[in-house]
Image (cartoon, rainbow, N blue to C red):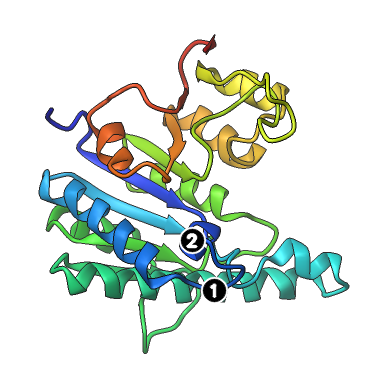
Amino acid sequence: MSPKYRRVLLKLSGEALMGNLNYGIDPKVVQSFASEIAQVVEAGVQTAIVVGGGNIFRGMKGAAAGMDRATADYIGMIATVMNAMTLQDALEQINVPTRVQTAIAMQEVAEPYIRRRAIRHLEKGRVVIFGGGSGNPFFTTDTTAALRAAEIDAEVIFKATKVDGVYDADPQKHPNARRYRSLTYTHALTHNLAVMDSTAIALCKDNDIPIIVFSLETAGNIYRALTGEPIGTMVGGSCEIS
């Protein structure tokens, strides 16, 4: 099937890069993700990525342990750049041209985030990985994904997780939890569903950017989402439950 979207933003959690490890990065997992992303690029789809840093450091946990929240968040932002560079290396090893742009100046290892330059890279067929979060503490990489998607005119956000969609209850605690096929932004916000944080969902709602939540555990799911195959949960439609 041919792609449904022309320009997409993929949100990857830092935890996804760990695989089954307790900490850090599993190179085999990163290589697997790179191969799936390459499929998207080969289909002619302009691809941007926002990657988290929770596999290395999470600001909220640092703050809970007594660190200054802003300091903890900046450390978390630096962790996202480490993940972005790792993913860039995996992509370029399979000949996918990639650029890392970071909201925190690190000119020796990455470009600064410049919206027009990012769009130009996408138009030239390069994958753009946004590291450094939004450059501001107190905001998550979910919010960064929504912000960057709006800035680069992405048609959709792919939220790739370890769960196969959004449920009406925690499926690990409630075996009878039901998965939504689709739901509205408002329903996700009012019911505090684990899609993205509220700021990110509100940004997507205001800019009419759909969010597709699906599992990375199944190989090929990124391309399936790209072609419009009904996997996971679509946020931005009507409420429909499995």
What residue sits 67% from the left and 64% below the top? 137
What residue sits 74% from the left and 33% below the top? 173
Of the image marks 2 and 1, the number of the one nearer the N terminus = 2
Quadrant housing residue 29: bottom left
What residue sits 52% from the left and 45% below the top? 162
Quadrant where the N terminus is found in the figure = top left
Q: Tell me if I can see residue 114 in this picture.
A: no
Residue tagged 1? 24
Quadrant housing residue 178: top right
Residue tagged 2? 19
- Check if mark 2's residue and mark 1's residue have beta carbons within 8 Å: no
Residue farthest right in this picture: 66
| Residue 105 on image: x %, y % | 46, 80
Looking at the rendered structure, the kind of residue marked 2 is Gly
| Residue 86 on image: x %, y % | 38, 74
| Residue 221 on image: x %, y % | 32, 38
Quadrant housing residue 188: top right
Looking at the rendered structure, the kind of residue marked 1 is Gly
40 above or below 73?
above
Give the SS element for disc 1.
Answer: loop
User: Label 2, label 1: how many angstroms apart (C-alpha)?
Assistant: 9 Å
User: Can you tell which mark lies on residue 140?
Assistant: none
